[in-house]
Image: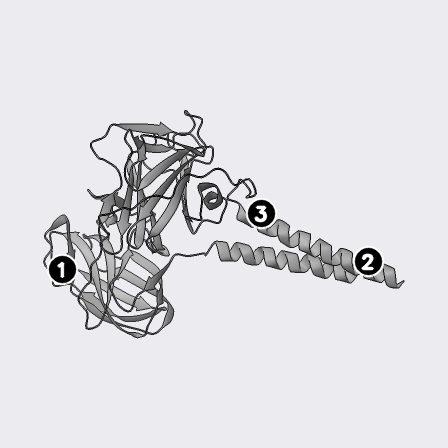
Amino acid sequence: MRKLTLLVLVLSLLLSISAITIYAEEVPVIKVANDRTTKIIMATQYTEYKDNSEGDELYIATDDIGDVYFDCIRTGDTFTYTIDVESAGTYNMCLTFGWLDSTGSYTIELDGTEVGVLENKVDGLGWRVWTNSTPYALNLSKGRHTLKITNGTAGPNLKYILLTPEGMDITDLGKSVHLYNKDAARTPWNFLENGTETIDIQFNATAPIEALKIFAPNWIAPAGSEHELEFKLYKWDKSYEKTIAGSPIASKLFPRYGDGVWLYMPVDVEAGEYILSVSNNGTDHSGFYLREEAYAGQRVYIDNVVQEGKSAELIIAYATTPSADYGELSAIEAPETENPQTSDTFAVYTSTIVAACVLVVLKKCKVKFMGY
């Protein structure tokens, strides 16, 4: 009996660890498509960044449409990305840069082996005039790889890595869409000052999404403060209550972000209806802007209550050109009390496993008792 109990406990622990592993992948993995250009957002999707200085961090800036980029990279800076290739083949790799020069040398490594050097010959047009470099033919086998870029010429701003299957032109790269009226009055919403725990944004996406962006102040937070925001993205599931009780399909923590910056969460999801949940995890100096006007295609909830006449300063970065028609949002329904009022699905999952294991043990005990 003691051995059986121990076995049940070990199995429960293994299943719990497995659930955690499934929920949180250690590194961002970029899927490389075989039918269109794959865009890697260099400043947010990297697995690892290392500089060639003595501890100076590379500056990540934001351009006029809320896109982030590496500003004025230095000789020896390296950027590592984890990619998952759908189909083996040759892919033309370009770097999207902003510069007043046409030079630029970038060493390319694949899975720890140097495969070549991209020597750029395309003229730069300006520091924020984004231009695609000379392409480099990169041979990729199917499956997961580590792609590392080492900068050999100090100076450029770098925004994207583009991977396009050989024989194709660089395809439609989509665009960013402001899901709010930029002329409407805006209100900075501080979570702690307003006694707010979460703000949820229900929205429709009419094309695949590559990133979500929210403009956030920190009220000139003092150095060393622990302010932060956390994003969690949920796929719409029949009702608001059921959706936020489920498991997020993407999440990102923004600790100690700067004052008045676009917080940028890369995602890889299809068109559809979603909820982006934003929380400050109890920290001060954290919040974002709301517009005092409703907007088609999104709905705002503050601590689970719908806010009529408000919208969030949310930008959707699409992978392909979206439809101009946002469509109807799902109707607001009464709370479904049979669903747990928490997004911690892991706790529910673990409790179910433990309960099942207890029943098994009790059943075994009963059988042994009856046979005694």
Tell me if residue 117 comes above or below residue 321 in the rendering: below
Disc number lying in front (3 or 1): 3
Which image quadrant for residue 219?
Answer: top left
- Amino acid found under the numbered disc labelled 2: Lys
Disc number lying in front (1 or 2): 2
Label 1, residues with CA under 10 Å away: few <14, some 14-19, many ≥20:
some
- Amino acid found under the numbered disc labelled 1: Thr
Q: Which residue is mark 3?
A: 347
Which disc, if any, is residue 369? none
Number of marks drawn: 3
Picture coordinates of residue 207 (x, y %)?
A: 28, 54
Picture residue at 47% right of the left edge, 32% below the top: 282
Disc number lying in front (3 or 2): 2
Label 2, residues with CA under 10 Å away: few <14, some 14-19, many ≥20:
few
Q: Quadrant of the C terminus?
A: bottom right
Q: Secondary structure at mark 2?
A: helix
Q: Which residue is mark 2?
A: 366
Q: Which residue is mark 1?
A: 103
Picture coordinates of residue 128 (x, y %)?
A: 16, 47
Tell me if residue 50 comes above or below residue 303 in the rendering: below
